[in-house]
Structure formats: structure tokens, C-alpha cells
Amino acid sequence: MNLSLPDQNMHNSSNTCPEDDKPDIMLPCFRRNMYDEPLASYSNGSIISQLLRKTIHNRRALDESSFYLSSSTAADSGQEDQSSVSSKDSMVEAPSPNGHISTAASPEGEHPITDHLQAKRARVENIIRVMAGSPNHKQHGDSERSDTDARDIREAREAYRENKRKQRLPQHQDHSVGGLVGRRSGSSSRDNGNTKDEECHKLKEQLHSMQRLLRQLQQKFLQVYNQEDPEHDDRDERDAAAEGQTKVVDCGVQQKENQNIQETLKQELSRAVNECVDRVFKKVSSTGLDFSPQLHMCSSPEMQINMGYYESSDAQRPQDQTEALSLVVRKPTVTPLSSVTPTVKRPYPVHQTPFPFNYSAPLHDSQILEHLLKYGPHSSFGGLPCMPPSMERSSPDSVDLPWETITMRSKVTSSHLNHHPCPSTLGTVTVDNLCLPHVKIECGELQSRAERNPYMSLNISFELNKTEGLTPSHLKKAKLMFFYTRYPSSNVLKTFFPDVKFNRCITSQLIKWFSNFREFYYIQMEKFARQAIVDGISDVKDITVSRDSELFRALNMHYNKANDFHVPERFLEVAEITLHEFYNAVSAAKDSDPSWKKAIYKVICKLDSDVPEEFKTSSYL
DNA sequence: TCTGGCCCTG
DNA sequence: CAGGGCCAGA
């Protein structure tokens, strides 16, 4: 009769007890907590654990009355901290899932279950059901309860309190079997002795270790499935109790299918990338550009100077751009720098930290692919483990990501850069910093796929955003701009940093950058001017600034550290003029005046030249 | 008052 | 390179 209680009890507890509904709002993988662990274990398949449970259960059946008294008392904790938990635990644990109470006789054949015990158990089970269903008792069917039941409840409460007083051992590892066994031992030791408890304890420990392993496996598996098919997982959850071992087989099959899909995806992607690389290489070779991979992987600074930004710009064709757009930036304006332009700053970067968007660790192409494989194209990059969960959200127009967190966590980004780099920066910085043709080709391929995939294009669309913070790339760009303008106006800055969302703070920071640049510049000028005087140079005309000059090297090292930018000739002229100014002023002992430099500044600020248009593109660097 | 620039300091 | 103080000009 009541022996086949598992399903019924579970339904009762979940239907009548509001607290049991709470786990439903949790993620499925978290729903399988330690309290419904027995259910998960049974349904999902540890055969060994099931066998162990049978053994334990068979032995436990020897003293059913005390056991169920414990169970019921455990359930009677409406005023205690673990009421619903304990009751649920009891519900699942007490009856055999396979109804093998009837086989409860132990292998030794000792102590069959008496009718008396069965009757008493059935009564107590009824109590348990009612109590578990309504922790407050008053709300549900109080009137229907018999006096006998009420008396039993009172007894159970008393017994529970007594047992609880006795029980001082930590329970945190005994929520399922152990908790019950632990409570039971107090009342059953009279009959069965310590040996049995020890056996039970050993078995319990074995069972727990196996359950832990199983739980880990389940959680991993569930996490995978929750990512891919939440509905499927929910269905599995609902059917878990009935399906039992079948699911073990299902899981194996699904896992295999999963692996197959993964492999297929990988193969398909690498094939597409290979084809793309071939296509672009063909195209590039048809343009006559020298484009060997080795050249780009290991290009030296000298070579980069020869193939510098502007001197080589005539060799760049707009059509090259169409083949190698970065993943997230496809600008309507044609970038003068072809993505295949050999502007490689350093060997192929590999990511060094678990933080994929670290500026010191540009987004690896495989990371992009890995992400797409792992989380799907619609996941957005917020799905990366390092990202705060709030990044998951996205909108059709833009992906509004709280990038401050990312920047703050960047190892390289110093405190002053704790602003709000936005997705377009992501595209610009990470992909551009890759500076590798095949990466961009791949990105181009992804882009073309994105055009066919409405979900994927969500990620592409954030190129329309502007960054709310300045990045190392912006700093580098500003330094290069300094070769043209020492005193850029706010408007010039806004013009040449179109991907930056300007506000007062950003403007001030950019202005501050140039102020710092000037400071270094003037310090060098004064230093070399004084050195010239010390060296005995008497004629200012003997002082020149060329690319071989120490002064130029110092400046170039500061503003163009990677030496991948061809400094315009005009800068050499301005530097020479500045040096002359300082030389003359110091020679004339004007430096005794505290504000003697102001006159020089006034001269130099008029020597600014126009910054080339190429700097206007946000993806310039 | 705001902005921009320089100077000093860390 | 940034922060803060100070100053000058609009």
C-alpha cells in the first residue's frame, strides 16, 4: 500500500510545500543540491551507489520503527532551520525507490518485518507526508488529522528534540543518508549495537564518496547541457525520477553526440579558415605584394620602417581592406592601412592570462573560435568565464557591456585607464593587435557568416559604439600624433579619435597626455641644448637634428617605442628649431627668468602641422 | 567659471 | 603617466 511511496511523496512535498518550489527558480545545475542528491543519484544512475543503498536499506529495515520515528521527527522541524530540507530528505530517503522493502530481510535472514511494524510505519509515513506538505500545519488539513496522528506527531516531536539534543555531531556531510543514520543510531543502538552502526557508517562513507563523484559528473554534464539545451535539461529533470538508469545510457549517447558535433564543427571551421587563407593569399600574390608568412611573423623593426605607415601607403589598395576586416569593425570609410600591410609589431601573440581581453594578451583567434564553439554565436563575448554575468545581456542595436570591470582587471592597464572601454575598442585593440593576416581573414570569414546569421551579427553590431575610455592603443596613437602636433586642440582630438565617446574627463585626459608628451619633449630639448653648450658648440647652426641624433633616438624611443612608425621629416625640423630655441635661451642666460620657457613654447606651438587623415580611422592602430 | 597649460610629485 | 596645485585667458 504505502510502500510504493517515492513518487507520491515527492509530488506531495513539491506540490504542497511552497518552499520546495524555490529551487525551481535556480539553474538546473544548482538545483541538484545535496538535499535532493539521493533522487539524483537514483535516477541518474550510479548503480554501485544504488546497490549500496539497497544494502543499507536492507539493514535499516531491521529496525524500521525507530528508523521511521527518526525520519518523522526529522521532518517535524517546522520551527527549525532545516524543516523543508529535512522533510524532503526523509521523503526521498525513507522508502525504497524500487519498493524493495519486501526484500528487506537481510542476507543473514534475521528479523523479518512484523505486521505491527509495517502498520506503525504506514501510520508514521502518513504523518510525514502531511507534515512535509505543510510546515505550518495549520494551513493544510488540520481538521482531517486524526487524534492518533496528532499524538504521534507530538511523540515524534519529543523524540526529535531529544535526539537533537543528543546529536552534536556536525551534519553538513550527512544530509542524505548520513543524517538519518546519524539520528537513527541514537535510538536504535539499544537493539543492534555498535557493530552494525560501524558497518552502516562505512557503507555510508563509501556511498558518499561515490555520490560526490557522481555529483561532480552530473554537474559538469548538466552545465554543458544547460548551455546548449535548457529545455532538454528541464525535461530530463522532470523525467529523472522515472527514467532512472535509462538516463545513464542516454547521457552516454548524448555525450558521444556532443563530441561528434564538436569535432565536426572544429573540422568545418578549420577547413573554412584554410580556404579563406588560400583565397586571400592568392589575391595578395596577384597584387604583387611580397607577402610571405615568415615576413609577417618575424618582421624586424628595420623592415617595418621601410614598410612604414605612410611611406608604404601607396602600395595599399582599398580593395585589400575588403578581404581582411577585423571581427567587429567594418567601417564604411576605407582604412588606408590594409590589413595585409606588414605592420606587425611583434611575433604572434599568445594569450598569457586567463583573461582573454587583456590588452597584453590580445584576443587569440582560437579564443574567438573557442568561444563561438563553446557558447554559440548568439552568446556574445560576455559568456567568457572572465566576464561578469551582467555582460551577458545584449540588445539588437548594441551590446552594452560594463567594461570597467574588465579594464580594472587588466594587468597592463594602469589605474589611469580605468575608464569604460567599449566593444569597439575590443575589436580595434584585440583584433588589430593581432596584426596577423590569417586572423583577420578568419575574422572576415566569421563576419561573412555573421551576415548570414542574424544572431551572430549582434556581436558585430557593437562596432557602432564608441568607447567611453582611452585604451593603450589610443595612447599609442596619440604619441604618434605628437610627431605632427604638439598642441592639438580639443576639436582636433575629437576628430582624430572618432571611436572615443568624448566627455570632459576623456578630453582632459587626452590633453593631459599631450601635456605630458610636451613635458618630456621640452625636457629633452633643454637637456641636449645644455649639453651642446657644455660641448662647446658656439654656433647654433652647428646644431642639427637628424634620425641619427641621440636626441631623435630618445624622442623616438619615447613616442615610437616599437619603432614601427616612420617619423615625418617635419618633426625633425621642429625638433631642431626647438633645440635652437633652447640653446639660444640658455646661451643668453635667459633661464634665470622663471618663465623663460614660455617664449619658447610660444614659438613651438606655431609649428604644428596637420595630422594625416589616416589617423582619423578608429581602427588605425 | 571653465578650460587649458605648466610645474611638481609620485 | 596621472593627480594636484596654480595660473592665465576667454
Image: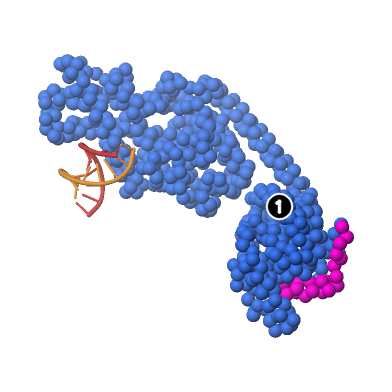
Chain colours: A blue, B red, C orange
Residue named by callout 1: A205
Q: How many marks?
A: 1
Q: Which one is nearer the viewer's eye here, A186 or A102?
A: A186
Main SS, magenta region, reads: helix
The crowd level at tag 1 (other Cα within 10 Å; few <14, some 14-19, many 20+) is some
Q: Is residue A560 above or below residue A10?
A: above
Q: Which one is nearer the viewer's eye here, A247 or A40?
A: A40
Q: Which one is nearer the viewer's eye here, A606 or A565?
A: A565
In the rendering, at what x and y percent does residue A540 appear?
Answer: 17, 19
Residue at mark 1: chain: A
Question: Judging from the image, what secondary structure is the residue with disc 1 in?
Answer: helix
Horizontally, residue A52 falls left or right of residue A519, namely right
Kind of residue at disc 1? Glu
In the rendering, at what x and y percent does residue A478 appear?
Answer: 35, 35
Horizontally, residue A377 falls left or right of residue A503, namely right
**Quadrant housing residue A599:** top left
**Quadrant housing residue A156:** bottom right
- What are the residue bounds of the magenta stretch? A108-131
Per the image, is A23 magenta? Answer: no
* Residue at image coords 70%, 50%: A209
**Image quadrant for the N terminus of chain A?**
bottom right
